[in-house]
Image (tube, rainbow, N blue to C red):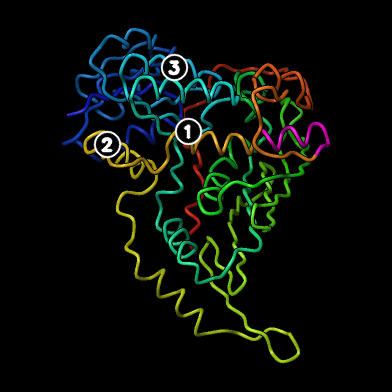
Amino acid sequence: MLNVAIIGAGAISAAHITAYLAFPERCKIVAVVDMYAEKAQKRINEYGLEGAQAVTDYHELLDQNIDLVSVCTPPYTHAPITCDFLHAGTHVLVEKPMASSLQEADMMLEAAQKSGKLLSVVAQNRFTTPMMKLKYVLDSKLMGPILHVQVDSFWWRGHNYYDLWWRGTWEKEGGGCTLNHAVHHIDAMLWMMGPPVELQAMMANTAHDNAEVEDISMAMLRFQEGALGMITSSVVHHGEEQQLIFQGKEARVSAPWKVVASTARTNGFPEPNPDLEQQIQKLADDLADVIHVGHAGQVENVLNAIETESPLLVDGKSGRNTLELIVGIYKSASTGEKVTFPLKAEDAFYTREGIMQHAVHFYEKKTAVENFEDLGITLGRKLES
């Protein structure tokens, strides 16, 4: 039985608690930490976490018998909390984004390497049936080489969303919608396509004058084999439709699921290729559905890795790759320059201080509330058809 602690009792902590409770024979939540003791105790009471202690300072747990922690705090705190627990001999599952800078991400990777403990970064959208099927189909190469990828990470957040004290600043949130919303879909794209070699980006703040950061960005990518891509990240899109589309030489597939295959007529114009469509559809249909979805699926993967030394689906290096692409978007959008990868330690955008100094500050944050009412949040669509 693994002892688990939840670090941070904000809205996302509910998803982690529910995920661990799906495996009562394998793990037990023994502590919930929050700077506001009443928030930690509320989570304990809400989920009936018998015997769990409410703690206001995570340092109190570093010398206790904790096997695994979920870090559910604001991005700027991820690195110190993660490193402290790794050095204390505790496995870590940290919420997205991994950190607010590449320097901090590298500190986390080094701590994991030195401690020999596991570091996993939350990317719960991978643990869904549509994403698994999409990855399976792409890996089959039935579509031929991928020529273009389109990522539409469309969300909507009201003006007061950025009133929360740590949101909307380069220092504490680390960025806007590109880092904290599109991170899900950027992770999935990198999982399926691998990293780009260069990009050009633009960003703006069109509707949230209480935030320093962007509320929409667009990036054009070029991949090693010549494919192009486009990522749109937004919190100004009503309806929050989200999609990933992969155009192969022989067919296209997407989440939400759609498969279309074409062949050329004698004049070069398209006509349907139903045989290939059926092959791809059968391949997708033959893959079993995911049993534990979202955070529960990722928690299961982490528990398996701890218990059997099986591989993590989303490790620290994967989290860093996602962060590096996002930092590249911020660099290009702030400087107007084309960005090539990898970004090196001497890059002006490598540290949080460098990002704070060089990234565009759209507005001055003037409003800061300590807490919102404890309401439900949207975690993104499962991209089902």
Residue 302, x across and y down, in percent = 32, 37
- Residue 366 position by quadrant: top right
Q: Is residue 128 above or below residue 121?
A: below
Which residue in the structure is indicated by mark 1?
375
Queried whether the magenta region covers residue 201, the answer comes back as no
Q: Farthest bottom residue?
A: 266
Q: CA distance from mark 1 to mark 3?
A: 26 Å
Classify residue 222 as left or right of residue 315: right
Q: Is residue 204 above or below residue 163?
A: below
Precedes in sequence: disc 1 or disc 2: 2
Pointer 3 with pointer 2, Cβ within 8 A: no
Which residue in the structure is indicated by mark 3?
81
Classify residue 154 as left or right of residue 125: right
* Residue at screen point 51% across, 65% down: 257
* Residue at screen point 31% across, 28% down: 46
The part of the chain drawn in magenta is 327-337
